[in-house]
Image (spheres, rainbow, N blue to C red):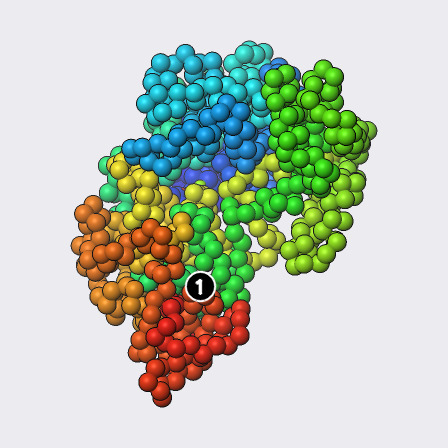
Amino acid sequence: MDENYLDELNEQQRAAVEYCDGPQLVIAGAGSGKTRVLTYKIVHLLRLGYEPWRILALTFTNKAAKEMRERVEQLVGGAVASKLWMGTFHSIFARILRANAELIGFKSNFTIYDSSDSLSLIKMILADMGLDKLAFLSGPRKGQKKYKPSAILSAISSAKNALISPEEYVRSKDLLEIDARDNRPELYAVYRAYRDRCVVAGAMDFDDLLYYTNVLLRDNPDVLRHYREFFSYVLVDEYQDTNFAQHVIVTQLTRESGRLCVVGDDAQSIYSFRGANIRNILDLRKTYSALSIFKLERNYRSTRNIINAAGSLIDKNSEQIPKTVYSENETGALIEVVKCYSDFEEAYQVASRLSQLKMTSGDSADEFAILYRTNAQSRVLEEALRKRNVPYRIYGGLSFYQRKEVKDAIAYFRLALNPDDDEALRRVINFPARGIGETTLAKLTRAAIDGNVSLWTVIQEPDRYPAGLNAGTLRKLDRFAGLITEFVQADRKGADALELATRIIERTEMLKMYLHDSTPENLSKQENLQELISGVKGFVETRVEEGSDSMSLADFMAEVSLATDQDSDSGDASEERVTLMTVHAAKGLEFNNVFVVGVEEELFPSAMAQDSPAQIEEERRLMYVAMTRAKKFCMLTYAGSRFRNGQTVCCRPSRFLRDIDQRYLRLATNDNLGDDAPKVRPTVNYTASMAGSARSLNSLRKVQPSSGAPQSFRRPGQMQPSAGKPASDVRYALHSVSEVAEGTVIEHAKFGRGAIVNIDTAGPDPRITVKFENTDTRTLMLKFAKFSIVGTE
Ligand SMILES: Nc1ncnc2c1ncn2[C@@H]1O[C@H](COP(=O)(O)OP(=O)(O)OP(=O)(O)O)[C@@H](O)[C@H]1O
Ligand SMILES: [Mg+2]
């Protein structure tokens, strides 16, 4: 162990690390070393003789857990670090639940449903209850279904996070009243049915992992006592984002012993939509009367300009704990604010500035992040980066495990471990095709619901649960059941993950199916399945190296099923790549260079927050989180128009740009971005007043979000394409010859992206010759060619 670890802390941090006499809250701003304190405190506890397997450290993301583990490993060595109970709330409590599943009516092999499983189950229940076809709403939620599956799921999630069971739900007058007002009086019944079907399937969703941990600790005093005594110290990062269910677990485990250290920053509370409650941190003293509060005041992460700019932004929030922050870092560059004409141009500008900065700074790709408010914004950015051959890694989008062929294979893995898993069974009962159609599945479902058993039980016991199927269908089901049984038995006989996974892929003939024809799509599916097998192989090899015998398919799945939507990434982790992620996923992380894109009203802050001052404050905190990820360089961009939800909409700059003290900002225009920057001209679509680009920050400040955009940012009739009019009419426009030049890159309405290689003005009608990326070079008459200008080559 490195004996000098305390020297790597400042005085305040050191005091927080060394204090082990009672419950402790460390509250401090971004970049002040809260996570560092937590990490070093673990090392300190080990030093004091605490046993590693009795220290519990909880984080919010897998990535944060991994980083903390790596740091502890550096300080105390891998052998000790691997014994710590360190992970996300979900992974730690899944482990505890597996060890005690029988006590709460589950088996230890329970499946973890991901959000698409949950949604599919909700849809099935709504259809079964006849609630899916009900009329659409009027009023503020006009046009939405009364029982919109995603809204139902989030209502159920809120109930679970507040520890409300279906039985308690139906007894709560308040909840029933709200549901009646929202035109969904049957919500409680959907919740109950959802819970029942999950129990029958031996499945828990993400919220259940917290909910059932609470049930387990509440109903089994000896189990509670065991874990209270077992965990000799509990540490939690990002406490401002805990919800009620998490808060109760933590307090249950530590209220008596007081051996608790939590760190957090109220200014970074960004998960209230998932039930996170800032009061958990503010009221901690009520639970722990002996609570000691520690503050950290020196920021180590960012330049002074970045700290000051972020500070001036968050000052505009009315509710916050006052904090002192100082920095001894250099002043650094001003924050660049870039106005773009469209989302296309924004992506182009970001990719271009990023490549330029990468060259001049010498920073590796890992030191760059592009942060956005919504995942949907990533597509154009990816395109722009690909064009410049900048390698990137995207968090959150369609991750490897969410690809169709991988999900199909994983569904078989899940069935091998738990054949009652209805959602997995539903997914692959006719995949690869074996003549078991929708009608058969509907009949099986009916029998399963009536008998309150899983689909698997109905298939296994057709006499007891008759589904009205003919002999031919029963034979097909029998063959399918035989296949699954074979996998189940192989697992029980102790096959390791690789043996079983390989067998599943072979016996189901999944890979073979894609070998039939070599379309590029099929080839990529084959590759993905092979990649999955390599992943399993890698997993088994690592376990062998570690001397562990936990190498069953269940062990592999325990890792895979907790890769959340948010922090599962695409791509090879060993390669240096630019990170693309939502601001939510970036919590706790840091990069030398950060680009925050789409800093526009209705996007950031989100359109959904517009009517609520509290939600605007949460969005502002989110912006604060985004900016404070940057160590040296931060750029904020916004566009004049953006393609969203199938149409082009005009956008105006975010109010947050006005909130930041302008002393720390520099309005970068296309002209001063450097030689590499494209010289973009406005399309006629966006008014002439946007041309020239050198709008001062002061004029930006005059934009009044509440009163709508100023005329210069919006043209009557252009905000939304009128009904029935294709979106492309708005996105693409006609251009005059003065707006284009050789080398101008355009996005044509029909032919896509291309560069102008020649302009012919000899005849009465000017013509442009465009070398398109995905089709032949074409000569077009300018007066008929609809396109948008993306930039220059
Ligand atoms: N005493 C110190 N000496 C050197 N570097 C430090 C010190 N304290 C913190 N740092 C560095 O400052 C950066 C920010 O620290 P850390 O991530 O722990 O802050 P944080 O308070 O957890 O931030 P956030 O609120 O964003 O989660 C890290 O790179 C960390 O290594
Ligand atoms: Mg942190």
Left or right of 20 in this view: 568: right
Please tell me which residue lies in front, 595 or 638.
638
Residue at 38% across / 35% down in the picture? Answer: 144
**Disc 1 marks which amino acid?**
Ala
Label 1 beta carbon within 8 A of ligand 1: no
Left or right of 531 in this view: 325: left
Q: Tag 1, which secondary structure?
A: helix
Residue 385 at what x, y percent from top left? Answer: 49, 62
Mark yes or no: residue 27 visible.
no
Residue 98 at what x, y percent from top left? Answer: 64, 24
User: From the viewer's perspective, is residue 768 above or below residue 721?
Assistant: below
Residue at 54% across / 29% down in the picture? Answer: 124
Task: From the image, tell me which residue sits under label 1.
Answer: 351
Q: Quadrant of residue 321?
A: top left
User: From the viewer's perspective, is residue 728 above or below residue 436?
Assistant: below
Furthest toward the bottom, the residue is 762
Residue 237 at what x, y percent from top left? Answer: 46, 35
Quadrant of the image containing the C terminus: bottom left
Mark yes or no: residue 640 visible.
yes
Please tell me which residue lies in front, 396 or 170.
170
Residue 492 at what x, y percent from top left? Answer: 78, 27
Quadrant of the image containing the N terminus: top right
Residue at 47% across / 55% down in the picture? Answer: 379
The picture quadrant for ligand 1 comes to top left
Residue at 31% across / 53% down in the picture? Answer: 722
Neighbor class of circle 1 (other Cα within 10 Å; few <14, some 14-19, many 20+) is: many
Please tell me which residue lies in front, 338 or 734.
734
Q: Quadrant of residue 65?
A: top right
Q: Quadrant of residue 487?
A: top right
Left or right of 724 in this view: 430: right
User: From the viewer's perspective, is residue 590 above or below residue 141?
Assistant: below
